[in-house]
Amino acid sequence: MIGHLRTWPIVLALTIVSAPLVLMYVFLFVDTISNAPAGSFIPNEFTLEHWSFLWETRPGRPSIWRVTLNSFLFATSTAALVLVISSMAGYVLSRLNVPGRTYFLAGVMVLHAFPAITLIVAIFLVLQVVGLYNTLIGVILVKAAIDMPLGIWLMKGFYDTVPWEIEMAGIQDGASRFTVWRKLVLPQVKPGIFALGLFAFLLGWGEFILPQVLAPSGNAQVLSVYLAGLIADDNNFDMNMFKSVGLFYMMPVLILFFVFQNRLMNIYGGGSKG
Amino acid sequence: MNASRDIAESARTPIGVRAAQSRLHLGWLSSSKGLGILFLLPAVVLVVLFFLMPVALTGVFAFTNMTTATGITGGAYQVSPGTLRVLTDRYGMGELAERLGQPTYVVDEQGLAALEEKGIDKNIIDSLRDGLLGKTYASRRELERDIRGLPDRPNTRTVKSISEEFSRSLANARFSSRESLIAAAEAIDPDLTDEEKEALAASTYTGWTWTTENFRRLASSPTTRQVLFNTLFFVAMTLVIFNTGYAMVLAIATHYIPDRPAGIFRIIWFLPRISPVVIYVLLWKWLAWDTGFLSAFLSNFGVRPRNWMLDTATNAWFFVIVINGFVGASMGMVIFASAIKAIPESLFHAASVDGAYRWQQIRHIILPQLKWPILFVTCYQTLSLLTSIDQTLLATNGGPGGATEVWSLWIYHTALNNYAGNLQYGMGAAMALVLVVIGIVLSLIYLRLFNYNALVAKPRIEL
């Protein structure tokens, strides 16, 4: 398609602008297992001391395993909630004849673009009054609600691609609409459900501001808040240790992303293409 | 697998009979309407709880002076030197304040009843009632002198414990309701006017009250203008330079190079988006901190090490925009790249044959095709940049000296987290309300940008 046009200048230019990113991520790995002399970046010794946070709990901070478990619970619960709710609501919007369907779809699209973070002051006060402040349950519900419009939107897109003939055949054979959905349609959108679940998990795993505001301390602390707390503590500035905690935190993300890259790329593009 | 077996089984019985049976058994589950309402229910509940209600409550809280000090659920009536000063200054009732603030001793039935409970001699109580009931004393000394003058002559310790029961001072007293406050005030001064009662209740109330003060403060404060300017500057710069401009450069550049390097670059530029935000910003800190990469690298050339991110306001802005922009670029990149991919390749071939330069191809083939995607990305990203908080909070936290404080961060610092510790919920809600209104307007525009009618095809099964 390009014919007489050369490509290497473009590659060179892209390489130069991408260099800072590459540098940062390469040193994210390098610095966690090595030490460098002061004022230099070339590592001169191999060490595992930066990973000591795995077996030594720092005074005044929860154990890393406890925090990791919280993060895992938080991410899986939000993903599960989003999946269940949006696979049901998405089907209605794609297929069923319900009064007010078009308004609901318009509402979902507005909510998808609407910045839920502006509501955090009101949500913060409500959670305090109902006693869900500083609990995992409270922040899980909020996060699931915020991710839900995108989930419904994506699931509607997946359902739209399922041929009507499958459902018609099921109805013809006397199955109820519920049975048709459960046994005929759901298996058709399995890849979509998988991608959405993965995506919602990653969103939950990386979430920072909601847990920071709604469940900042105690038994509900998640990894992002834990790491931000470490970094904000001026008395123990240890960049290599921060990076080790960071790499530990990011490992699941990297693995999932590289394994399921293609499925995720589409959703990250704003989800407009289902 | 199961599904196909079910169909196979059901095929053996006549269709009509089966259909009638299942409708009988499952009732609403087999109708589109019943199932639809059931399926929408959880989504509707979440929308009501976490979108509609917070929007309404933000509007409500915005008209209160709620803070950490007032609490959320209401308060009590606390008389203190401070509230008495308020009574003097704001309501001009200095005389009343003085009267209420002074220790006062009133011989009344309430005190006598307390004495009875204390087990004081019945005769003493009776003579107190006969001789002193209804009298008011400005000091304890005067009261005790009168008590000693009683026929029964109680000893000094008893006098002390008697006089204690008649102390009716309001100073530093706390009342759980308005009624008990007014009752206590009337015990000291029975001739309180309604106006005075009103002022007393208002000045001693510790809970929140309704007010439009938040908006007045917001409109008149110079900080508002500064933060508003910061926000617009931040959104415009990030949007134009990175979220659309640079995203387009990436999409077009990766279009013109072979698939393999193109894929690698796309992954590299995706890293900021998939990385948890705390780690992503940490990496930038490593780059810019005074012991970080830039400082150490530049020290080879004799540049003094410094915190490049927080050194000056210009530097802070540079990093805030780059940090946010690198995340935002990937969304535009994906959307633009797929729009370019949708352009028929024959167009490019034809252009090549005609000897069009790459710039001419971009100008006349690619850019016209990207009009709608650009509009979409601009609209969506304006909204998310207006409310973006994570990256800026973690990178500069609004610093140095408030130079990079944007609107959403200002809300956070006012209502959710600050050094002073007194969180102004009402004020924060008023600030948030501004964003909520902008958010609703922009998302309605966003809705208009879609070809909406094509999205809601009519269901083809009428059941």
Image (spheres, rainbow, N blue to C red):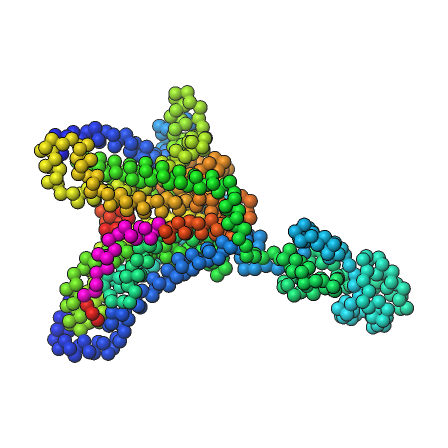
In this rendering, is residue B21 above or below B360? below
In magenta, the rendered stretch is B442-460
In which quadrant is the N terminus of chain B drawn?
bottom left
What residue is shown at x 16% (from left), y 43% (from top)?
B343
Residue B297 counted in the magenta span: no
Visible residue check, residue B60: yes
Visible residue check, residue A215: no
In this rendering, is residue A108 above or below B261? below
In this rendering, is residue B111 above or below B393? below
Toward the viewer: B378 or B26? B378
What residue is shown at x 38% (from left), y 50% (from top)?
B439
Toward the viewer: A184 or A60? A184
What residue is shown at x 28% (from left), y 46% (from top)?
B376
Q: Where is residue B268 in the image (x, y as percent from the top left)?
A: 27, 38
Residue B450 counted in the magenta span: yes
In which quadrant is the C terminus of chain B drawn?
bottom left
What residue is shown at x 39% (from left), y 39% (from top)?
B234
Q: Is residue B151 left or right of residue B386?
A: right
Q: Position of residue B134 (x, y in %)?
A: 80, 67
Q: Where is residue B43 in the image (x, y as percent from the top left)?
A: 34, 62
Q: In this view, does A112 lie to the left or right of B56?
A: left
Toward the viewer: B41 or A23? B41
The chief SS type of the magenta part is: helix
